[in-house]
Image: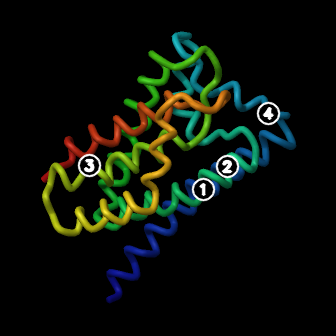
Amino acid sequence: MKEVFGEIRTQILILGTLVGIMWGLEILDTFVFRHGLDTLGILPRNAIGLRGILFAPFLHGGFAHLAANSVPFIILGWLIMAQSIGNFVAVSVICMVIGGLGTWLFGANALHIGASGIIFGYLGFLLARYYFDRRLSSGIIALFVGCSYGSVLWGILPSIPGISWEGHLFGFLSGIVAAKFLAE
């Protein structure tokens, strides 16, 4: 039982730290840098924009944007972490790199920021994992995630100006790649 609580404590610490970094950066960006940090996002087909692959998931276009990303980041991230912290790290890195590169290569000529690419990656991973590993627990999680978050899949299509549907699409696809790569 002590090991279980230790694992949960570690999961809370990791997720809390990542979300805390996002909130801390948004506070600094808003009140100190006057949204200047947002220029560190992904700028497609521009060499300097490659740095956004690392920074974009931590930057947001305001507190409403960050709040909208925080809850699904925590829930979907924890569902991945429940299997293993190693999977969470691997899925996060795969989604950041592949999703970010896809956005950099094919995204609209605008700054792309926010954790939603990673969130869509988590969604893709959790939905596709059962297809690749055929474990009952993965199927139950996929069913829960599909019922709870399936409607957001419309976000991978161009719809609302100013929303990086490309980041959503390539994040989602990178999650499927992660599911294939991490299948046991």
- On the image, the x and y values in percent for residue 60 come to 68, 40
* CA neighbours of label 3 inside 10 A, class few (<14), some (14 to 19), many (20+): many
In the image, what residue occupies the spot 40% across and 62% down? 147
**Which residue does the numbered mark 2 point to in the structure image?**
66
Assess whether mark 2 and mark 4 are in contact (beta carbons under 8 angstroms).
Answer: no
Report the Cα–Cα distance between label 4 and label 2: 13 Å
Q: Amino acid at mark 1?
A: Ser
Q: Amino acid at mark 2?
A: Leu
**Which residue does the numbered mark 4 point to in the structure image?**
35
User: In this view, which residue lies farthest toward the top?
Assistant: 46
- Using the image as rendered, state which of residue 43 and residue 90 is in the foreground: 43
Secondary element at image label 1:
helix
Secondary element at image label 4:
loop
- Using the image as rendered, state which of residue 148 and residue 74 is in the foreground: 148
**Which residue does the numbered mark 1 point to in the structure image?**
70
Q: Is residue 72 above or below residue 110?
A: below
Report the Cα–Cα distance between label 1 and label 3: 22 Å
Q: Is residue 3 above or below residue 74?
A: below
Report the Cα–Cα distance between label 4 and label 1: 19 Å
Q: Amino acid at mark 4?
A: His
